[in-house]
Image (cartoon, rainbow, N blue to C red):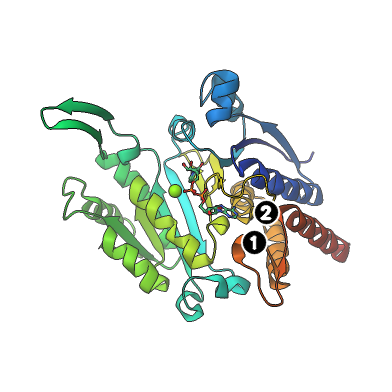
Amino acid sequence: MSKSYRLIAIEGEGIGPEVVDASLKIIQYVASLEGFDLNVNYAMLGEVAFNKLGSPFPKETQQLCENADGILFGAVTGSGLLELRQHFDFFINLRPIRIIDSLVEKSSLKSDKVLGLDILIVRELVSGIYFGSSGRGEDYQGIYGYHTMKYYDWEIRRIARVALELAQRRQGLLTVVHKENALPHLPWSHLVLEEAKNFPNVVVQSMLVDNLAMQLVLNPTRFDVIVAGNLFGDILSDIGGALMGSVGLLTSASFNAQGFGLYEAVHGTAPDIVGKGIANPLGTLGSAILCLEQWGEYNAAKRIIQAQEKILAQGYRTADLNPHGAEILVNTEELVQLFLQELGEEKRACN
Ligand code: NAI
Ligand code: MG
């Protein structure tokens, strides 16, 4: 009997539907090549869900996701996503920043600064300032607003253990991001170092977030795995877009302790290009690849990665990558067709 997976597609808003549909076409095709069933159900989140079902994270979506093997997500503008992440306790957010060889000159940095770049940002995703108590009020000084950055030590320790484990499997270097000079009650370095006692092969270095932002631009190849809280991880990972050449290339996967995952690009709804059919789907496709790998479908993942390498090496580029010279401008659908063609040819070559 062939294997079968249930994937929930949450397209969201803006370019969300464009990049999710593009990725689905490609992974559905690969599923047929590899001989497993991929059953896709659509669910709503955010504004669309609020308008149709009265809540940004409705019960219907919750139930669909609870019975699934993974969630492929586009983007939303407002609420819904934080609730989804929290509901499933997706505390592990992995954000790889890896240079694609044929796109090395698309980086905002000179090629020699980014050649071989391979960073993994491990961001805590369900706590910190995005989930702390917040509000607006008024006192004798005027109207004010506040958000609270609160972390239980166990929340820092559990994301630290994930990051240490991953560093152990990679180059063995873990950088802890913190701001302990101004926020001494959030002792990230101390807690990560304590957890690191069980990982003798991992070297841990701690770095203030402001310095780390600068180092990511000055000398990004010095990093391997970076562990960060929710806010710092969110902000720092966008630097990856400049390093790689476009925010449209950045992928991410979020997991809970059971290994159930939410797969989404790092970018947002991109209101300036919505509806034009020119969005770069590779960020979302990269997330879908992470999903296939999480399921153990390594051959399927490899097929897509190889097809992508070939297509990019041939010079095909979406508009965000500013094609010039011999490079060929393609829109989202044309890029999808190139993938299907390449994957089909690979299949014929194998037969
Ligand atoms: P954004 O990532 O949507 O766009 C930033 C710039 O990058 C824009 O110029 C956009 O055209 C370009 N861009 C982004 N993705 C692209 C792609 N796949 N292909 C080609 N170009 C791409 O960030 P922005 O403008 O700050 O946010 C827009 C909305 O998205 C906001 O409402 C924000 O809250 C939301 N957002 C949602 C996220 C999510 O659902 N996970 C994440 C980040 C932002
Ligand atoms: Mg962000």
The residue at the point 61 percent across, 44 percent down is 15
> Quarter-wise, where is residue 164 in the image?
bottom left
Question: Of the residues under marks 2 and 1, which one precedes in the sequence?
Answer: 2
> Quarter-wise, where is residue 106 in the image?
bottom right
Dot 2 and dot 1 residues touching (CB under 8 Å)? yes
Vertical order, 310 against 152 (above or below): below
The type of residue carrying mark 1 is Ala
Count of picture labels: 2
Q: Nearer the viewer, residue 131 or 38?
A: 131
Vertical order, 101 against 10 (above or below): below
Q: CA distance from mark 2 to mark 1?
A: 7 Å
Percent x, y for residue 264?
Answer: 56, 46
- SS type, badge 2: loop
Quarter of the image containing the C terminus?
bottom right
Relative horizontal placement of residue 211, taking residue 220 as reference (left or right): left
Vertical order, 270 against 207 (above or below): above
Looking at the rendered structure, which numbered label has been put on residue 41? none
Relative horizontal placement of residue 291, taking residue 346 as reference (left or right): left
Percent x, y for residue 51?
Answer: 57, 22
User: Would you say the beta carbon of the disc 1 residue lies within 8 angstroms of ligand 1?
Assistant: yes
The residue at the point 16 percent across, 49 percent down is 184
Residue 172 appears in the rendering: yes
The residue at the point 73 percent across, 72 percent down is 314
The type of residue carrying mark 2 is Ile
- Report which residue position mark 1 lands on: 319
- Report which residue position mark 2 lands on: 278
User: Would you say the beta carbon of the disc 2 residue lies within 8 angstroms of ligand 1?
Assistant: yes
